[in-house]
Image (tube, rainbow, N blue to C red):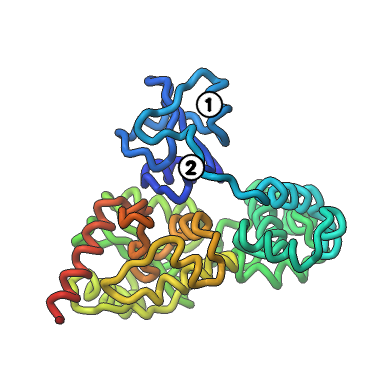
Amino acid sequence: MNEQEKWQAVLARDNGFDGMFVYAVGSTGIYCRPSCPSRRPRREMVRFFDRPTQAEDAGFRACLRCHPDQTERPEPNLALMQAVCRYIDENPEHPPTLDDLAQRFHLSPYHLQRTFKRIIGVTPKQYAAAQRSQRLRTALKSGNTTTEAIYDAGYGSSSSAYAEAGTHLGMTPDRFRSGGADEAINYTITPSPLGMLLVAATETGICAVRLGDSEADLEATLVEEFPAATRVRGGRRLQQWIAPIADYLGGARPHLDLPLDIQATAFQRQVWTALQAIPYGSTRSYSEVATAIGRPTAARAVANACASNPAALVIPCHRVVREDGGLGGYRWGIQRKEMLLAQEAADVKRER
């Protein structure tokens, strides 16, 4: 995670990130979990640490509200699987096979695959592909030529990079490097019961549905993602998708079955598909979603996938709550999540 992603988790008070890092506030000398209910600090006063001990070494003390220094019983194989991740990361040009990893870490291939998938959320092969894709993305944004970026990222050939590009980049490496040049994105921003609503789409389908407080902030997110794309406000094809979303927000449409054109890892797609199967007016806990996709111990990874959902409402991540029934976090603000769940519950009750 980068610091912006961590800060978004803090703003959302997302308990799915608890245990992954802590944040410390310079003005108070206190460090907290991401889900801490205390008042949000100013961004410039915040520092992030991977572990509570690091925050304490830096002179911060544990919050008495969220007790970030108190941890649950650790996963016994977590350190081992983290070592596997590091080994994969250290060998980008020749990603180790499952048999290579099994031999190096003295496990059977079956046990390593099953344990890695349970803890990390994806297979070693999927993890390596995702890391390679991220390296390619970083290299392309850094100004490297497409060929240099492809080989620096660890691809053995340009053909393999282009074959994966549609899934991981949403476009060819050349077009991604140019900031989405020649990519046509139509978008609209309109008031809604939940604040300002942005809907953006390519020729293939919806690429973003976001909620916010101002048009400027929402528009800036598109510019940041595809600075060289052709962004056109309005467009007839958007109307066929905006109307169902407006109907949903008005309580007239319980289901949103709309085409999507979004980037995702294999694990994210599993989670997002499971979220779309949650009935209108119902909720599921993070662990229930994890169980539904066959990853019963991946509740935290499920929470991370919810936090990275690019299509609010269409992918109903607001229907996922904490084990104790608490709302948990929401990328677009906890009050909006509360309003959505209240509306859905009222609509279901009225139909009965």
Relative vertical location of residue 27 with respect to residue 70 in this rendering, above or below = above
The answer for how far apart the CA atoms under marks 1 and 2 are is 15 Å
Q: Is residue 209 visible?
A: no
Disc 1 target residue: 55
Residue 254, labelled with which disc? Answer: none
Instruction: Using residue 176 as the reference point, say whether residue 220 is left or right of it.
Output: left
Disc nearer the start of the sequence (1/2): 2
Relative vertical location of residue 54 with respect to residue 7 in this rendering, above or below = above
The three-letter code of the residue at mark 2 reads Lys
Compare residues 66 and 208 and report the one nearer the observer. Answer: 66
Residue at 39% x, 62% y: name it.
285
Crowdedness of circle 1 by 10 Å Cα count: few (<14), some, many (20+)?
Answer: many
Residue at 40% x, 48% y: name it.
14
Disc 2 target residue: 6
Crowdedness of circle 2 by 10 Å Cα count: few (<14), some, many (20+)?
Answer: some
Position of residue 99 measured from the top left corner of the image (x, y, whole percent)? 84, 65
Compare residues 124 and 322 and report the one nearer the observer. Answer: 322
Which marked residue is nearer to the observer: mark 1 or mark 2?
1
Instruction: Using residue 324 as the reference point, say whether residue 269 is left or right of it.
Output: right
